[in-house]
């Protein structure tokens, strides 16, 4: 599901050091695990706090 929601392939190597890429992946992971789709702006705020 995460792969489908992000558009990244299941075996594709992605640059998680890129905040925009990481945000899309984290948003999809949270949606899968928690069942809630957080706004991308909230995810980016969380990344900046990390």
Image (spheres, rainbow, N blue to C red):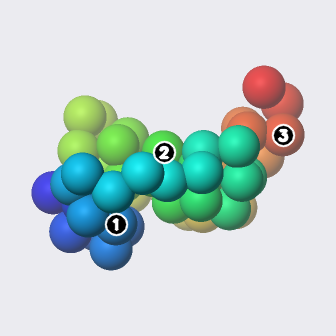
The image shows residue 27, relative to residue 4, as above or below, that is above
**Residue 38 horizontal side relative to residue 1, left or right:** right
Q: Are marks 3 and 1 in contact (CB under 8 Å)?
A: no
Question: Residue 50 location in percent, x, y?
Answer: 78, 25
User: Which label was assigned to residue 21?
Assistant: none
Q: Nearer the viewer, residue 16 or 26?
A: 16
**Residue 36 horizontal side relative to residue 13, left or right:** left
Name the residue tied to disc 1: 8
The image shows residue 21, relative to residue 7, as above or below, that is above
How packed mark 2 is, by other alpha carbons closer than 10 Å (few <14, some 14-19, many 20 or more), is many
The residue lying at 33 percent from left, 57 percent from top is 12
**Residue 32 horizontal side relative to residue 7, left or right:** left
User: Marks 3 and 1, Cα distance to the nearest angstrom?
Assistant: 23 Å
Disc on the earlier residue, 3 or 1: 1
Q: Secondary structure at mark 1?
A: loop
Q: Nearer the viewer, residue 3 or 42?
A: 3
Name the residue tied to disc 2: 26
Disc on the earlier residue, 1 or 2: 1
* Quadrant in which the N terminus appears: bottom left
Question: Can residue 35 be seen by looking at this rendering?
Answer: no
The residue lying at 73 percent from left, 52 percent from top is 19
Question: Residue 49 location in percent, x, y?
Answer: 83, 30
The residue lying at 51 percent from left, 60 percent from top is 24
Residue 35 sits in which quadrant?
Answer: top left
**In the image, which is nearer the foreground, mark 3 or mark 1?**
1
**Residue 25 horizontal side relative to residue 18, left or right:** left
The image shows residue 38, relative to residue 7, as above or below, that is above
């Amino acid at each position: 599901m995460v792969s489908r929601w992000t558009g990244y392939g299941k075996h594709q190597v992605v640059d998680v050091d890129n905040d925009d890429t990481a945000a899309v992946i984290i948003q999809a992971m949270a949606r899968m695990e928690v069942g809630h789709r957080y706004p991308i702006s909230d995810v980016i705020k969380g990344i900046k706090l990390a």
